Amino acid sequence: METNKTMRETTINLPETKAEAKEKAPLLNSSKAIAILEPPNRGTKKGIAIGDFVLRLCTIGATLGATVTMGNADAVAPFTTRFLRFEAQFNDIPTFVFFMVANGIVTGYLFLSLPFSTICIVRPLAKAPRILLVIFDTAMTGLTLASASAVASIVYLAHNGNPNTNWLPFCQQFGDFCSSTSGAMVGSLLAGTLFMTIIILSAFALKRN
């Protein structure tokens, strides 16, 4: 009886195996584990993605405003009589029609790009949507600046004319028309500048490892 009691009370200390040691190892704090696994530049890229989204909203306002302003460009000369009516509209000049169509296309693209910009906010480390946006942003920047440059030449002639070719300025007769087209041109140039800023931010986000 005493022998059996002694055997029950005696414990044998065996060395722990590596598997048992790993199982008994203390778990890391969840927040510390996330901090270790999370790349250090994730926050920077997320901030860039948020800035990209805000800039796209501003660019939508600029291109949409330019399109609407150009579409409403209409003026009647003050010397209109009952038999003669002198009116200037945007569709009288093909360059202005091209401008309105181009800015309408860019506005539609910007609306379609918002979901991809949102993906970049949710997944800042994703490269595929950002690369896709950079490619199409570059194309839309060229279209926006091309239309704005074309309109700028017409607006300049409308205000100043060209004495070498005997082209007379007509903004004194159609002041509201020239004001609308000039405002649309400024809005499109602003949109082009915003586009270039977006592309620079996207390139900076792609460059960071």
Image (cartoon, rainbow, N blue to C red):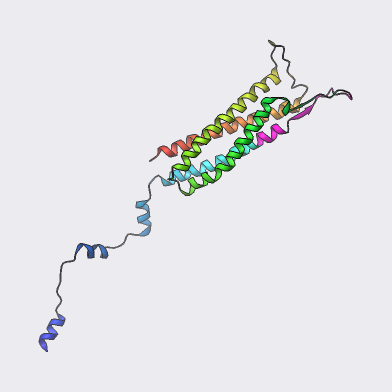
For the point 53% across and 32% down, the residue is 139
Residue nearest the observer in this picture, 62 or 135:
135
> Residue 137, how many percent across, how many down?
53, 35
**Is residue 34 toward the left or the right of residue 23 in the image?**
right
Quarter of the picture holding the N terminus = bottom left
Compared across the picture, whether 206 is left or right of 194 comes to left
Q: Measured from the top left, where is residue 109 in percent x and y? A: 58, 39
Which image quadrant for residue 170? top right
The reply to whether the magenta stretch includes residue 69 is yes
Extent of the magenta region: 65-83
Between 157 and 129, the one lying in front of the other is 129
The residue that appears at 15% across and 76% down in the rendered structure is 11
Above or below for 36 versus 17? above
Residue 70 included in the magenta stretch of the image: yes
Look at 57% across and 31% down and name the residue there.
192
Horizontal side of 41 relative to 137 (left or right) equals: left
Q: Quadrant of the C terminus?
A: top left
Residue most extreme to the right: 82
Q: Residue furthest top?
A: 164
